[in-house]
Amino acid sequence: MPSNGQSERPLCVSGALVLRDWNATPEPAAVLIENGLIAGIAQGADQAALAARAAETIDAAGLVLMPGLVNAHYHAYSGLLRGTENSLPLELWALYTVAYGRTLDADAIRLAILLGAAEMIRSGVTAYIDHFPHLRQAE
């Protein structure tokens, strides 16, 4: 729902192969979204009736519509350290990144978080757990 408290206009995504759950086979369907929530999924002839409830329809033919991915282990601050100390083994590199991460100020941490979030959203990740070791900058 928008932050101003107003309702969103209903949206229908049609023509995509819809993956209802991770054990299912993707099948052509239409998905109606109202107020930021899935309000209905229809297949076959029922797709047109569902689309009629929407203020806008997105043609997603040739695409797959699926639940968002979850990244269960992420270190946002380390995004700023890519390409540094690549010659080290993982264990030593991990120590290096934690130590170097302590030198990052709040602005750098914020930029690292935004960069990581943009990359994950672009890859289909909609939630993540950030293993952030720098407690003094937890805010």
Image (cartoon, rainbow, N blue to C red):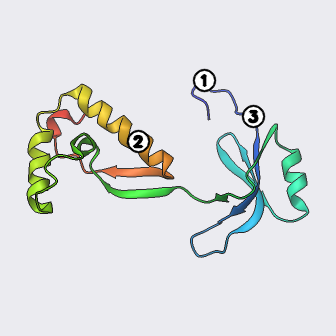
In front: label 1 or label 2? 2
Q: Position of residue 41 (x, y in %)?
A: 76, 59
Tag 2 secondary structure: helix
Q: CA distance from mark 1 to mark 2?
A: 23 Å
Position of the C terminus by quadrant: top left
Q: Nearer the viewer, residue 16 or 11?
A: 16
In front: label 3 or label 2? 2
Q: Is residue 138 left or right of residue 48?
A: left
- The residue tagged 1 is 4
- The residue tagged 2 is 117
Sort mark 1 into few (<14), some (14-19) or many (20+) by Cα contacts within 10 Å. Answer: few
- The residue tagged 3 is 9
Q: Is residue 58 above or below residue 19?
A: above
Q: Amino acid at mark 3?
A: Arg
Quick check: marks 1 and 2 in contact, CB under 8 Å? no
Which tag, 3 or 2, sits closer to the chain's start?
3
Q: Position of residue 40 (x, y in %)?
A: 76, 55
